[in-house]
Amino acid sequence: GTYSYTVPQDITTLSIESWGGGAGGGNQAAQANGGGGGGYSKKTISVTPSETLTIIVGSGGATGVNGGDSSVKRGATILATATGGLTAGGASPTPGAGYYDIWYPGGAGAAAQGGGGSRAGSGGGGGGGSSSAGAAGGAGASATPGTGGAGGTPDGGAGGDGGAPAASGVNGFFPGGGGGGSGSSSSVSGTGGNGQIKILVP
């Protein structure tokens, strides 16, 4: 969602912590990959007392949809951001230069197993945490679902587990966990966990 934030009187700097949304698991016709986890960033920005900033919190992706970026903006200018995970399973891409002081990416979702027949889905990647990156999801085997990757410590969301054969994937956890892949074409992959933004006033 999109929100407004008014800087308090006498405040000239803010510390912004952002988590991007996790991606949904893949939308393959059969066994699916897990979605990538959203990343974490921290950025100290200069502000003017009483100015209004725009806060954009990235949503978790639906099946086959990337996670949304979480950003703080002044007008059209991005001041701080954390990128969302990728539904193709990739780790969250590094934000542009100047948009972060600290960056920990989300984990990659595991690749789909494929091969036809009844096979389990793969796990989603964990969301980045404020002290470490998210872990990659585990690959599904012929009958064993892949495990979702752990969230980065201490506050990243875990990735969702893959679905058992013919079962749906598990949704990624808040904040930023990637969704688990489905186990067959008759089921659906899990959605990604939503992102979040924390504004720390000195």
Image: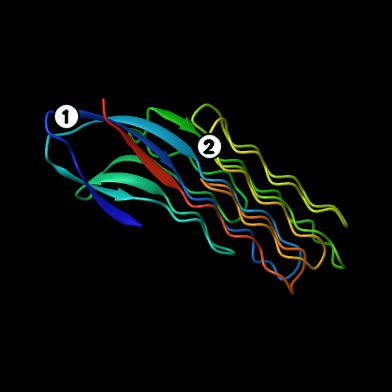
Q: Which residue corresponds to the image point at 56% horizontal and 55% vertical from the top-left?
A: 192
Q: Position of residue 100 (x, y in %)?
A: 37, 32
Q: Is residue 173 above or below residue 155?
A: below
Indicate the quadrant where residue 151 lies: top right
Residue located beneath label 2 in the image: 105
Q: Is residue 3 above or below residue 6?
A: below
Q: Amino acid at mark 1?
A: Ile
**Circle 1: is it few (<14), some (14-19), or many (20+) Cα within 10 Å?**
some
SS category of the residue bearing label 1: loop
| Image quadrant occupied by the C terminus | top left
Q: Which residue corresponds to the image point at 65% horizontal and 50% vertical from the top-left?
A: 124
Q: Position of residue 195 (x, y in %)?
A: 46, 48
Q: Which mark is residue 11?
A: 1
Considering depth in this image, is 117 or 145 the residue closer to the camera? 145
Q: Position of residue 200 (x, y in %)?
A: 31, 32
Q: Are marks 2 and 1 in contact (CB under 8 Å)?
A: no
Q: Which mark is residue 99?
A: none
Q: Position of residue 57 (x, y in %)?
A: 38, 51
Q: Is residue 35 above or below residue 42?
A: below
Q: Amino acid at mark 2?
A: Pro
SS category of the residue bearing label 2: loop
Q: Distance of mark 2 from mark 1, alpha carbons?
A: 30 Å
Between disc 2 and disc 1, the foreground one is 1
Q: Which residue corresponds to the image point at 74% horizontal and 56% vertical from the top-left?
A: 112
